[in-house]
Amino acid sequence: MICNTQMFTTTRLAANQSLRRYKVQDLIIHMHEHCLAGRPVHIGQAIFATIFNLISNTIFSIDLVDPDSDSAQEFKDVVWEIMKESGRTNLGDYFSVLRLIDIQGIRRRTTGCYKKLYRIFDEMIAQRTLSRSTLSDSPRRNDFLDVLLDQKDKNDFEFSYDNIKAVLADLFIAGSETSSTTVEWAMAEFLRNPDCMAKARMELTETISSGQQVEESDIDCLPYLQAIVKETLRLHPPIPFIFRKTIMDVEISGFAIPKNTCVPVNVWAIGRDPDVWADLLSFLPQRFLGSDIDFKGQDFELISFGSGRRICPGLPLAFRMVHLMLASLLHSFDWKLPNGMMPYDMDMSSKFGLTLQLAAPLCAIPMLDG
């Protein structure tokens, strides 16, 4: 609830627009350095670092990773490990006698990953608590950590430091991994389908002047880019399964499902349903041009972020960042595969966890036009 009212409101998102613009500008500068050197870029790592730093600035008012450093990949690995273990079938969920002994080691591995994140959070919270004390003259930053600490000060017993760290972990894990995965899949599909990339770049050239930075206000004027994001989410939903609990006994397709049953919704299969989608395995953004189908929870053909009261609270931020980063990467650079690789040589297979990632991380070389 506190995220919905304090971090993802229209007012807060509007106030942070300049921060998002600045972080995307950092991403383009990073890509430009690789462009001049003719070096391939690890797309997923660079995008992950950008989003991770956006979240860390929103929460802590500082960057936490450098896109070129090992720290970016280390954070990405920790987040992926949590996602992978969370998506693994746990026998303890089905046999209570196994829950305490953790026979598969899932709890042990997940706990180790969370400890790495919590060490950073502990340091940030300790520093901020000191700066907020009456002994310090440090100005108030009014970021999300201040909001959480204000909440704790109001009611110390109901909102503890452990609650704060849990909220922060959810924001970093869910926010950074899903958006970066979506952009990486979209870039992979561009490189796999050069005609789509050419058409998207043409739309950007006709809408935005050369050398001008893409703005969030431009997104509404880029229908083909929006169709690309929808088609990417259809084929490669960042969260392949959404879990919901039944609030009453219900019968679905002849199956009786008792109240309080955890039901997985297979978003990946919905996006590949032959009764809904023609030529379902092909990447065809044009299928969404002139279509009212969207991923904001009203159209069950495309529910990548869920629906109803349990829809992902970070959807408004993800919408802005995915479109802005993707448009900026295409508007600023042309792209090619490294080492003479051809589009048909690309490995487009997936690896499943709680999120759906490319099995082989995407590397590509940014190039300037002309």
Image: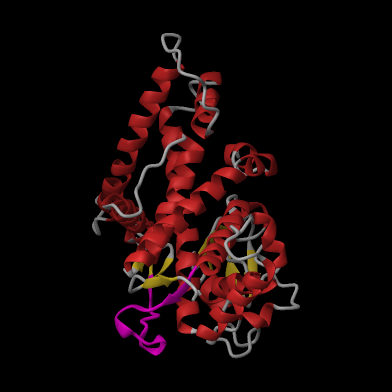
Residue under the point 36% across and 65% down: 36
Residue under the point 49% across and 49% down: 23
Residue under the point 47% across and 35% down: 61
How far across and how far down the image is residue 11, in percent?
69, 40
- Where does the magenta region start and end? 333-351
How far across and how far down the image is residue 113, in percent?
29, 48
How far across and how far down the image is residue 196, in percent?
56, 82
Whether residue 342 is in magenta: the answer is yes
Q: Quadrant of the N terminus?
A: top right
Judged left or right of residue 80, residue 29 is right
How far across and how far down the image is residue 46, in percent?
39, 59
* Relative height, residue 359 to residue 312 (above, below): below
* Relative height, residue 311 to residue 345 (above, below): above
The answer to whether residue 25 is seen in the rendering is yes
Give the quadrant of residue 205: bottom right
Residue under the point 38% across and 72% down: 365
Residue farthest top in this picture: 135
Camera-nearest residue between 64 and 291: 64
Whether residue 369 is in magenta: the answer is no
Camera-nearest residue between 330 and 232: 330
Give the quadrant of residue 307: bottom right
* Relative height, residue 43 to residue 53 (above, below): below
The answer to whether residue 297 is seen in the rendering is no
